[in-house]
Amino acid sequence: MTERVDLLKYETELYKKNITRIAGVDEVGRGPLVGPVVAAAVILPQNYRLEGLTDSKKLSEKKRNQFFEILKRDAIAIGIGEISAKKIDEVNIYEASKLAMLEALNNLKVKPEHVLIDAMPLSLEVPSTSIIHGDALSLSIAAASVIAKVTRDEMMYALHKKHPEYHFDKHKGYPTKLHLECLEKFGPLENYRFTYKPVHDLIEKGEKNKHEENHKKQTI
Protein backbone atom coordinates (compact mmCIF):
# COMPACT_ATOMS: atom_id res chain seq x y z
CA MET A 1 0.00 0.00 0.00
CA THR A 2 2.81 2.39 0.87
CA GLU A 3 4.49 1.87 -2.51
CA ARG A 4 1.38 3.00 -4.38
CA VAL A 5 1.17 6.19 -2.32
CA ASP A 6 4.89 6.84 -2.94
CA LEU A 7 4.46 6.38 -6.69
CA LEU A 8 1.80 9.09 -6.80
CA LYS A 9 3.63 11.47 -4.45
CA TYR A 10 4.82 13.91 -7.15
CA GLU A 11 1.56 13.70 -9.08
CA THR A 12 -0.55 14.31 -5.94
CA GLU A 13 1.43 17.46 -5.11
CA LEU A 14 0.57 18.78 -8.58
CA TYR A 15 -3.09 17.71 -8.36
CA LYS A 16 -3.39 19.88 -5.24
CA LYS A 17 -2.45 22.85 -7.44
CA ASN A 18 -5.15 21.87 -9.98
CA ILE A 19 -2.51 20.58 -12.41
CA THR A 20 -3.90 17.36 -13.89
CA ARG A 21 -2.24 16.92 -17.29
CA ILE A 22 1.09 15.55 -16.07
CA ALA A 23 3.47 13.89 -18.52
CA GLY A 24 6.03 11.38 -17.29
CA VAL A 25 9.09 11.04 -19.55
CA ASP A 26 11.79 8.39 -19.67
CA GLU A 27 14.22 6.90 -22.16
CA VAL A 28 15.78 3.48 -22.74
CA GLY A 29 18.69 2.30 -24.80
CA ARG A 30 21.70 4.30 -23.66
CA GLY A 31 23.86 1.20 -23.26
CA PRO A 32 23.22 -0.86 -26.42
CA LEU A 33 25.74 -0.92 -29.27
CA VAL A 34 23.06 -0.90 -31.95
CA GLY A 35 19.81 0.84 -32.81
CA PRO A 36 18.15 4.01 -31.56
CA VAL A 37 17.68 5.47 -28.12
CA VAL A 38 13.91 5.52 -27.50
CA ALA A 39 11.92 7.79 -25.19
CA ALA A 40 8.27 7.83 -24.21
CA ALA A 41 6.06 10.54 -22.74
CA VAL A 42 2.86 9.41 -21.03
CA ILE A 43 -0.07 11.38 -19.57
CA LEU A 44 -2.15 9.24 -17.22
CA PRO A 45 -5.67 9.98 -15.96
CA GLN A 46 -5.81 11.82 -12.63
CA ASN A 47 -5.25 9.54 -9.60
CA TYR A 48 -4.65 6.59 -11.95
CA ARG A 49 -3.35 3.44 -10.28
CA LEU A 50 -1.88 0.31 -11.77
CA GLU A 51 -0.89 -2.31 -9.22
CA GLY A 52 2.71 -3.48 -9.65
CA LEU A 53 3.77 -0.85 -12.18
CA THR A 54 7.32 0.35 -11.52
CA ASP A 55 10.66 0.94 -13.26
CA SER A 56 10.66 -1.28 -16.38
CA LYS A 57 14.09 -2.71 -15.43
CA LYS A 58 12.53 -4.29 -12.35
CA LEU A 59 9.76 -6.04 -14.31
CA SER A 60 9.81 -9.27 -16.26
CA GLU A 61 9.31 -9.04 -20.01
CA LYS A 62 5.91 -10.72 -19.66
CA LYS A 63 4.81 -8.15 -17.06
CA ARG A 64 6.13 -5.24 -19.13
CA ASN A 65 4.15 -6.42 -22.14
CA GLN A 66 0.98 -6.73 -20.03
CA PHE A 67 1.41 -3.20 -18.64
CA PHE A 68 2.21 -1.89 -22.14
CA GLU A 69 -1.20 -3.04 -23.42
CA ILE A 70 -3.03 -1.68 -20.36
CA LEU A 71 -1.27 1.70 -20.60
CA LYS A 72 -1.96 1.99 -24.33
CA ARG A 73 -5.64 1.53 -23.50
CA ASP A 74 -5.82 3.74 -20.38
CA ALA A 75 -3.40 6.63 -21.00
CA ILE A 76 -4.77 10.02 -22.04
CA ALA A 77 -1.83 10.43 -24.42
CA ILE A 78 1.40 8.65 -25.38
CA GLY A 79 4.27 10.11 -27.40
CA ILE A 80 7.34 8.23 -28.68
CA GLY A 81 10.73 9.73 -29.54
CA GLU A 82 13.44 7.86 -31.40
CA ILE A 83 16.98 9.06 -32.16
CA SER A 84 19.05 6.97 -34.58
CA ALA A 85 22.47 5.42 -34.00
CA LYS A 86 23.88 7.81 -36.63
CA LYS A 87 22.63 10.83 -34.65
CA ILE A 88 23.93 9.30 -31.40
CA ASP A 89 27.39 9.11 -33.01
CA GLU A 90 27.07 12.75 -34.08
CA VAL A 91 25.92 14.34 -30.82
CA ASN A 92 26.75 11.72 -28.07
CA ILE A 93 24.28 9.56 -26.16
CA TYR A 94 23.47 12.11 -23.43
CA GLU A 95 22.37 14.74 -25.97
CA ALA A 96 20.59 12.09 -28.05
CA SER A 97 18.63 10.96 -24.97
CA LYS A 98 17.46 14.54 -24.41
CA LEU A 99 16.46 14.85 -28.08
CA ALA A 100 14.47 11.60 -27.83
CA MET A 101 12.62 12.92 -24.76
CA LEU A 102 11.83 16.23 -26.47
CA GLU A 103 10.57 14.35 -29.53
CA ALA A 104 8.38 12.14 -27.33
CA LEU A 105 6.85 15.23 -25.68
CA ASN A 106 6.29 16.87 -29.07
CA ASN A 107 4.47 13.74 -30.24
CA LEU A 108 1.90 13.92 -27.43
CA LYS A 109 -1.55 14.74 -28.81
CA VAL A 110 -2.43 16.48 -25.51
CA LYS A 111 -0.23 19.30 -24.23
CA PRO A 112 0.96 18.68 -20.66
CA GLU A 113 0.79 21.31 -17.91
CA HIS A 114 3.78 19.83 -16.09
CA VAL A 115 6.46 17.30 -17.02
CA LEU A 116 8.07 14.79 -14.66
CA ILE A 117 11.42 13.68 -16.08
CA ASP A 118 13.61 10.75 -15.14
CA ALA A 119 16.93 12.24 -13.95
CA MET A 120 17.99 14.67 -16.67
CA PRO A 121 16.94 18.31 -16.98
CA LEU A 122 15.18 19.44 -20.16
CA SER A 123 14.63 22.95 -21.46
CA LEU A 124 10.84 23.14 -21.86
CA GLU A 125 8.13 25.74 -22.29
CA VAL A 126 6.08 24.12 -19.51
CA PRO A 127 7.22 23.64 -15.88
CA SER A 128 9.09 20.40 -15.19
CA THR A 129 10.61 18.40 -12.36
CA SER A 130 13.67 16.16 -12.80
CA ILE A 131 13.62 13.21 -10.41
CA ILE A 132 16.63 10.97 -9.78
CA HIS A 133 15.45 7.33 -10.16
CA GLY A 134 12.13 8.81 -11.22
CA ASP A 135 11.09 5.59 -12.94
CA ALA A 136 10.88 3.96 -9.50
CA LEU A 137 9.36 6.99 -7.72
CA SER A 138 6.68 8.32 -10.08
CA LEU A 139 3.88 6.33 -11.68
CA SER A 140 3.89 8.58 -14.75
CA ILE A 141 7.63 8.07 -15.32
CA ALA A 142 7.31 4.33 -14.64
CA ALA A 143 4.61 4.18 -17.32
CA ALA A 144 6.92 6.00 -19.74
CA SER A 145 9.78 3.62 -18.96
CA VAL A 146 7.60 0.59 -19.78
CA ILE A 147 6.31 2.11 -23.02
CA ALA A 148 9.84 3.06 -24.12
CA LYS A 149 11.36 -0.32 -23.18
CA VAL A 150 8.71 -2.44 -24.93
CA THR A 151 8.84 -0.18 -28.00
CA ARG A 152 12.61 -0.53 -28.27
CA ASP A 153 12.56 -4.28 -27.60
CA GLU A 154 10.08 -4.69 -30.47
CA MET A 155 12.60 -2.91 -32.73
CA MET A 156 15.25 -5.40 -31.64
CA TYR A 157 12.95 -8.36 -32.37
CA ALA A 158 12.35 -6.92 -35.85
CA LEU A 159 16.12 -6.57 -36.33
CA HIS A 160 16.56 -10.16 -35.16
CA LYS A 161 14.22 -11.37 -37.92
CA LYS A 162 16.39 -9.60 -40.52
CA HIS A 163 19.71 -10.68 -38.97
CA PRO A 164 19.13 -13.79 -36.80
CA GLU A 165 22.86 -14.55 -36.65
CA TYR A 166 23.34 -11.61 -34.23
CA HIS A 167 20.75 -12.92 -31.69
CA PHE A 168 19.24 -9.47 -31.03
CA ASP A 169 16.22 -11.25 -29.50
CA LYS A 170 18.43 -12.39 -26.61
CA HIS A 171 20.62 -9.37 -25.80
CA LYS A 172 18.55 -6.49 -27.29
CA GLY A 173 21.75 -4.85 -28.53
CA TYR A 174 23.48 -4.62 -25.12
CA PRO A 175 27.18 -5.60 -25.05
CA THR A 176 26.77 -9.10 -23.59
CA LYS A 177 29.35 -11.85 -24.15
CA LEU A 178 27.11 -13.39 -26.83
CA HIS A 179 26.64 -10.07 -28.62
CA LEU A 180 30.37 -9.25 -28.60
CA GLU A 181 31.11 -12.71 -30.04
CA CYS A 182 28.56 -12.13 -32.83
CA LEU A 183 29.97 -8.67 -33.49
CA GLU A 184 33.50 -10.08 -33.73
CA LYS A 185 32.34 -12.83 -36.09
CA PHE A 186 30.04 -10.87 -38.44
CA GLY A 187 31.12 -7.24 -38.00
CA PRO A 188 28.89 -4.22 -37.35
CA LEU A 189 25.71 -3.52 -39.32
CA GLU A 190 25.00 0.00 -40.58
CA ASN A 191 22.79 0.85 -37.57
CA TYR A 192 25.52 0.16 -35.02
CA ARG A 193 26.86 3.02 -32.88
CA PHE A 194 30.35 3.41 -34.29
CA THR A 195 31.58 5.75 -31.52
CA TYR A 196 30.88 3.08 -28.86
CA LYS A 197 34.13 1.46 -27.73
CA PRO A 198 33.53 -2.23 -28.66
CA VAL A 199 32.40 -1.22 -32.18
CA HIS A 200 35.10 1.44 -32.58
CA ASP A 201 37.82 -0.96 -31.36
CA LEU A 202 36.65 -3.71 -33.73
CA ILE A 203 36.78 -1.37 -36.74
CA GLU A 204 40.24 -0.13 -35.71
CA LYS A 205 41.43 -3.71 -35.33
CA GLY A 206 40.07 -4.57 -38.78
CA GLU A 207 41.78 -1.57 -40.35
CA LYS A 208 45.04 -2.43 -38.61
CA ASN A 209 44.89 -6.03 -39.87
CA LYS A 210 44.10 -4.80 -43.36
CA HIS A 211 47.05 -2.41 -43.25
CA GLU A 212 49.36 -5.22 -42.07
CA GLU A 213 48.10 -7.53 -44.83
CA ASN A 214 48.73 -4.85 -47.47
CA HIS A 215 52.20 -4.23 -46.02
CA LYS A 216 53.02 -7.96 -46.23
CA LYS A 217 51.89 -8.10 -49.86
CA GLN A 218 54.07 -5.13 -50.72
CA THR A 219 57.17 -6.65 -49.07
CA ILE A 220 56.78 -10.05 -50.76
Image: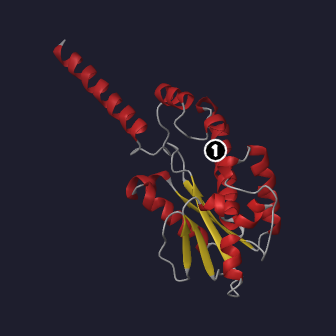
Q: Is 6 or 139 nearer to us in this picture?
A: 6
Q: Which quadrant of the view contains residue 54?
A: bottom right
Judging by the rendered image, the residue that carries numbered circle 1 is 156
Q: Quadrant of the N terminus?
A: bottom right
Residue 101, x across and y down, in percent: 55, 66
> Is any atom of residue 133 visible in this view?
yes
The residue lying at 48 percent from left, 69 percent from top is 121
Residue 23, x across and y down, in percent: 65, 73
Q: Is 42 or 194 nearer to us in this picture?
A: 42
The residue lying at 74 percent from left, 60 percent from top is 3
- SS class of the residue under badge 1? helix
25 w.r.t. 110: above or below? above
Task: Check the image and name the residue furthest to the front.
Answer: 2
177 w.r.t. 151: above or below? above
The residue lying at 68 percent from left, 38 percent from top is 161
Residue 97, x across and y down, in percent: 50, 60
14 w.r.t. 53: above or below? below
Task: Check the image and name the residue furthest to the bottom.
Answer: 18
Mark 1 residue type = Met
Residue 33, x across and y down, in percent: 49, 42
Q: Which quadrant of the view contains residue 215?
A: top left
Image mark count: 1
Q: Which quadrant of the view contains residue 43?
A: bottom right
